[in-house]
Image (cartoon, rainbow, N blue to C red):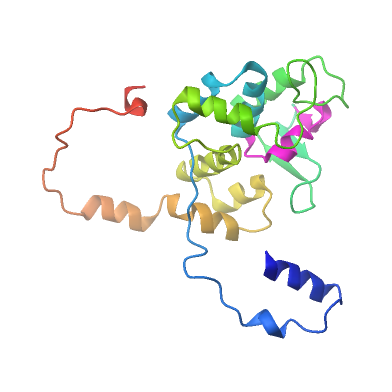
Amino acid sequence: MLKAALNRAWRDGKIPSDEAWRRVEPFEQVNAARVRYLTVAQAQRLLNACDSDFRALAQAALATGARYGELIALSASDFNPDSGTVHVRTSKSGKGRHIVLNNEGVALFEALAAGKSGNATLLTKTDGAPWKPAHQARPMAEACKRARINPPVSFHVLRHTWASLAVMAGGPLMVVARNLGHSDTRMVERHYGHLAPSYIADAIRAAAPRFGIKPSRTVVSIDARS
């Protein structure tokens, strides 16, 4: 963050040179992937544990991979049922984008936009009040507690969940990157590339030795039972 601020100051002409920090190398493993995501079963448990007004917001996050700030800024007219897309007017990068929805996402947004005027806020609380910054933290924590997701996850993990599951299902990294609002695949490769199907992973799973190892424990995870 400090380096980004210094670079901004240099580009704006407020300091004469970036030489002082240009040779500074990042900490080791600073770019290592450490993204947490929910399985489909965990996501379903979380949605079932959400309060009614928060559930729609969480569903929208899982259906789009959009950020919290992008979701709460959506108007009903930002959803286009003909193209099956949601228009994010301004994202973190400062540029707009169109998020492509699958059939489940289209059905969700059709229900959310039904009966609303074009300029009406798409996602609101039950009483019609808008979601504000940080309003998602408490209902998310409560939903995680009821869904027995421990340690609890932040709302942003829903974005990671969409991206991770899309990559594991074989979605091309460039396509996933565009839906997330990245201009290229670097961020997606850094955080989700290890999840993508690959020749190496397929070869190892086919050729690695097997020793007849069987688990001796009888405890079954909640996800496995579901």
* Residue 151 at x, y percent in the picture: 45, 37
> Which range of residues does the magenta coloring cover?
64-80
Q: Residue 45: in sight, yes or no?
A: no
* Residue 28 at x, y percent in the picture: 47, 70
User: Quadrant of residue 138 in the image?
Assistant: top right
- The structure residue drawn at horizontal position 47% and vertical position 24%, both measured from the top left corner, is 147
Examine the structure image and report whether residue 173 is included in the region drawn in magenta.
no
In the image, 58 versus 212, the foreground residue is: 58
Give the answer, above or below, for where 125 lies relative to 2.
Answer: above
* Residue 179 at x, y percent in the picture: 65, 45
Quarter of the image with the C terminus in it: top left
Quarter of the image with the N terminus in it: bottom right
Q: In this rendering, would 176 be left or right of 69?
A: left
Give the answer, above or below, for where 216 lies relative to 183.
Answer: above
In the image, 37 versus 131, the foreground residue is: 131
- The structure residue drawn at horizontal position 56% and vertical position 30%, both measured from the top left corner, is 141
Q: In this rendering, would 112 be left or right of 12?
A: left
The count of marks equals 0
Q: In this rendering, would 127 be left or right of 13?
A: left
* Residue 135 at x, y percent in the picture: 70, 31
- The structure residue drawn at horizontal position 66% and vertical position 27%, both measured from the top left corner, is 57
Give the answer, above or below, for where 21 lies relative to 81.
Answer: below
User: Quadrant of residue 126 in the image?
Assistant: top right
Q: Residue 95: in sight, yes or no?
A: yes
In the image, 223 versus 4, the foreground residue is: 4
Give the answer, above or below, for where 77 lies relative to 184.
Answer: above
